[in-house]
Image (spheres, coloured by chain):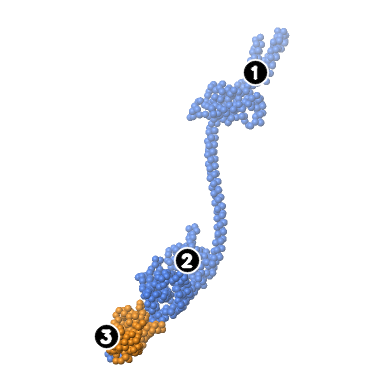
């Protein structure tokens, strides 16, 4: 898997034509690609996750609301940055949006510069996220290539157990632990133990990989 | 001797003749003759010549006297004979029938008239019993009559009879009449019995033999006449009786009628008195006019209403008081008939020139083919005033609640306004960006500016609608297409609907007749109902799609019905009971006036507001408004 370098896309979901039309014109005038959708459902059906981008999302829409779409995206593991645009300065709405990870919550009518700024921030964030994601994917792939015994040993290493301690816990010889350790270092392409631990911790945090669970 | 013989003869002759004289005279003559005879018989021979001579002279004188007497007697005899003939004539030819019977009832003597009555000759009758000639049916009567006659008279002297007769009833015993058989045919009627009236009296003849004298009178004709008369009398009496009965009957019924009339007259008087007191005490003006609209009478109340004395009005045209009757009445050729039985609102004219609102009802009556109309007018100024006040209060209340409603809706409407404003902001930014380029794309710029303008107008419209809605308006009713009104109203609620993710559907009947309404108030009603539905749908479980449908249709009784239906949880029994009462609310921040004011507004439009609700399946509120009438347009 490699990072997708194609042009970022600004997704726009609003049931109001005038809003879609004016914003599309505005955003396109800054040279960005805009894809507009009349409803959350339409967006879900047409969204291509490969491309980086951000989502300008209206809060109040018939059928699926902005909040509902946000929840659905989280549910589907789609982590596109969301900028809410609303005709309301409703504190409850905005709080809800931020709690669910929205980039911003803009009240209509908004300052176009702020909007454009937020859009570029969001796109940057998405690109960064995607890079990070790719990195994590690579580490995960390496972890996936470990044998189950190697994964056990890796777990103990990450928890700062010495070879001896590990051998004791796993009820195997020190020598065997040494062999596994060497294999792990090689498979994980780690220069040293510190790097290995960093890699695994990073991955665990991001991917919620909790190898110690496996020891229970 | 011869002389003596002659004398004897003479004496005898005389004697015979004397027989014929009345008894007394006859006796005297007889005595004289016998004296003379004794002289002559004594001794004529022995008598001296002188004596003889003296005797002779005496005889001669006596003879002369006798001759004279004889002459007188002859004369008397002749008179008697004449008298007897006259009597016999009289007897026979009398128009009354005479019969003499012996005590056995055998006919002794009969006159011609009696014979004729009995239809026999005298010879046939003499020595026959009279009873044989009497009609069988009357024979008993006859016998009884004769018996009574004889029993009472027999042995009594004629004088006594006469004497008795005076003490007895005027006539002798009598039988009214007999019916006698007649053998001889009467001309015309053969053997028809005649009716005879018979008077009888008992007499004794010179030989002292009892005889019965009967007089017979033919009373057949008289009787027939009497019968006819009595028949006629009877008939007359019967007729009289019948007519009397009829008269009595009709008299009774007349008396009854008189009594009834008397009573009803009394009632009439009583009623008239009552009516009069009502007439004059009535608060309502009562004005009677004739067919030419001329006032015939007016009561005291008209003075209070119109300012005129009742007397001033009599003879005036009704249009002095009610100048312009309602159009539909004045147009019609017989205006008053059309009015009968209904109450119309009209404008009256007071003496001082002011207009008095009136309720007018008209009743028709006619007397002797002349038609009259009684106008009853009630001054409704107070009521009008109160109605106006009520309406003003309602308008004020509606306005206040509209302000509240608008407060509740403000954020939604702000959202609605923000949409175009937001779009405008973006469009203008794009425009500015375009202008900033070296070669601005004017076509695109124009297009964008045009779009900007559209959005500005749109925002303006929303603001205008909102301002109209909250304005304390005094706009009167006008014609409206209910569907257009619904669409306009929904415009104010779009934001709320959207915010709550409610799907709104329209089921509006096409080509509905117009209604005549206060637009804003009807909008207010629709908004209230929509907002109620929106609120009801907030509690809907997340999985269920909230829906509201607005329907309009024409009902059978020429009303437009608008229905706002949601698929919410519905109302429970308690809520259903209280939902239309003021200040009842299920919302935390609600005032509880929405439905109550909506109902008042609909009712002010002569409509009704109802709802039905099924717990778990939703509620629908619906109201009706009558379609526009011709009378609404002026």
**Nearer mark to the viewer, of 2 and 3:** 3
Colour in which chain B is drawn: blue
Q: B371 or B75, which is in the foreground?
A: B371
Dividing the picture into quadrants, the one containing residue A194 is: bottom left
Which residue occupies 43% across, 70% down?
B610
Residue labelled with disc 1:
B18
Q: Residues within 10 Å of mark 1 (few under 14, many from 20)?
A: many
Q: Which residue is mark 2?
A: B343
Other residues around mark 2 within 10 Å, as few (<14) / some (14–19) / many (≥20): some
Q: Tag 3, which chain?
A: A
Q: Colour of chain A?
A: orange
Q: Nearer the viewer, residue A212 or B359?
A: A212
Q: Which mark is residue A1?
A: 3
User: Does B297 appear above or below A35?
Assistant: above
State which quadrant residue A143 falls in: bottom left
Q: Could you tell whether B424 is left or right of B315 in the image?
A: left
**Chain to which mark 1 belongs:** B
Q: Can I make out residue A52 in this image? A: no
């Amino acid at each position: 898997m490699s990072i997708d370098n194609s042009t970022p896309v600004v997704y726009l979901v609003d049931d109001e034509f005038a809003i879609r039309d004016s914003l599309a014109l505005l955003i396109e005038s800054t040279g960005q690609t805009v894809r507009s959708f009349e409803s959350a459902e339409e967006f879900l059906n047409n969204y291509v996750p490969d491309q980086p981008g951000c989502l300008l999302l209206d809060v109040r829409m018939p059928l699926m609301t902005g909040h509902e779409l946000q929840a659905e995206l989280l549910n589907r593991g789609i982590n596109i940055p969301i900028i809410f645009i609303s005709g309301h300065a409703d504190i409850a709405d905005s709080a809800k949006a931020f709690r669910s990870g929205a980039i911003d919550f803009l009240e209509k009518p908004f300052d176009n510069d702020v909007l454009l700024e937020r859009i570029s921030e969001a796109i940057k964030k998405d690109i960064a996220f995607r890079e990070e994601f790719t990195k994590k994917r690579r580490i995960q792939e390496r972890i996936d290539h470990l044998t189950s015994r190697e994964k056990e040993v890796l777990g103990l290493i990450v928890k700062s157990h010495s070879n001896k301690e590990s051998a004791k816990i796993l009820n195997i010889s020190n020598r065997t632990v040494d062999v596994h350790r060497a294999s792990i270092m090689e498979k994980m392409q780690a220069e040293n133990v510190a790097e290995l631990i960093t890699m695994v911790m990073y991955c665990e945090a991001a991917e919620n990989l909790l190898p110690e669970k496996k020891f229970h | 001797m011869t002389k003596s013989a002659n004398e004897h003869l003479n004496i005898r002759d005389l004697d015979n003749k004397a027989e014929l004289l009345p008894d007394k005279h006859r006796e005297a003559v007889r005595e004289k003759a016998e004296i003379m005879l004794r002289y002559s018989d004594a001794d004529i021979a022995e008598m001296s010549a002188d004596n003889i001579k003296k005797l002779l002279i005496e005889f001669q004188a006596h003879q002369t006297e006798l001759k004279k007497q004889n002459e007188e007697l002859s004369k008397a005899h002749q008179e008697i004979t004449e008298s007897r003939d006259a009597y016999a004539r009289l007897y026979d030819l009398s128009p009354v029938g005479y019969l003499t019977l012996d005590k056995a009832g055998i006919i002794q003597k009969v006159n011609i008239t009696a014979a004729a009555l009995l239809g026999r000759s005298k010879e046939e009758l003499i020595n026959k019993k009279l009873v044989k000639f009497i009609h069988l049916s009357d024979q008993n009567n006859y016998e009884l009559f004769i018996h009574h006659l004889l029993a009472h008279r027999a042995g009594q002297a004629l004088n006594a009879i006469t004497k008795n007769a005076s003490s007895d009833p005027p006539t002798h015993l009598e039988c009214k009449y007999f019916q006698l058989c007649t053998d001889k045919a009467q001309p015309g009627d053969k053997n028809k019995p005649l009716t005879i009236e018979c008077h009888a009296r008992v007499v004794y003849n010179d030989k002292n033999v009892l005889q019965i004298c009967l007089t017979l009178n033919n009373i057949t004709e008289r009787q027939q006449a009497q019968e006819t008369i009595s028949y006629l009398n009877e008939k007359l009496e019967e007729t009289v009786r019948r007519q009397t009965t009829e008269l009595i009957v009709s008299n009774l019924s007349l008396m009854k009628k008189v009594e009834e009339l008397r009573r009803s007259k009394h009632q009439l008087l009583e009623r008239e008195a009552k009516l009069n007191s009502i007439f004059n005490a009535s608060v309502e003006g009562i004005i009677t006019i004739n067919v030419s609209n001329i006032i015939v009478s007016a009561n005291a109340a008209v003075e209070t209403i119109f300012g005129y004395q009742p007397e001033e009005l009599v003879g005036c045209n009704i249009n002095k008081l009610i100048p312009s009757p309602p159009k539909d009445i004045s147009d019609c050729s017989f205006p008053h008939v059309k009015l009968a039985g209904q109450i119309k609102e009209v404008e009256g004219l007071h003496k001082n020139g002011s207009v008095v609102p009136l309720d007018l009802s008209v009743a028709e009556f006619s007397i002797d083919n002349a038609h009259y109309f009684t106008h009853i007018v009630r001054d409704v100024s107070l009521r009008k005033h109160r109605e106006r006040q009520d309406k003003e209060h309602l308008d004020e209340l509606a306005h206040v609640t509209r302000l509240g409603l608008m407060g509740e809706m403000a954020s939604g409407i702000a959202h609605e306004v923000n949409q175009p404003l937001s779009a405008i902001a973006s469009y203008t930014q794009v425009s500015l960006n375009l202008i900033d380029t070296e070669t601005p794309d004017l076509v695109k710029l124009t297009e964008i500016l045009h779009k900007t303008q559209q959005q500005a107008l749109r925002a303006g419209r929303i603001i205008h609608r909102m301002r109209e809605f909250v304005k304390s308006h005094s706009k009167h009713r006008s014609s409206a297409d209910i569907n257009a009104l619904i669409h306009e109203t929904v415009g104010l609620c779009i934001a709320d609907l959207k915010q709550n993710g409610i799907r709104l559907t329209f089921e509006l009947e096409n080509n509905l007749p117009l209604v005549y309404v206060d637009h804003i108030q009807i909008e207010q009603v629709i908004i209230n109902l929509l907002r109620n539905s929106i609120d009801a749908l907030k509690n809907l479980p997340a999985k269920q799609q909230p829906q509201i449908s607005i329907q309009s249709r024409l009902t059978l009784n020429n009303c437009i019905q608008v229905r706002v239906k949601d698929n919410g949880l519905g109302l429970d029994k308690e809520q259903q009971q209280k939902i239309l009462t003021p200040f009842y609310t299920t919302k935390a921040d609600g005032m509880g006036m929405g439905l109550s004011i909506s109902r008042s507004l609909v009712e002010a439009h002569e409509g009704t507001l109802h709802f039905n609700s099924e717990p778990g399946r939703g509620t629908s509120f619906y109201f009706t408004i009558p379609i526009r009438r011709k009378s609404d347009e002026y």
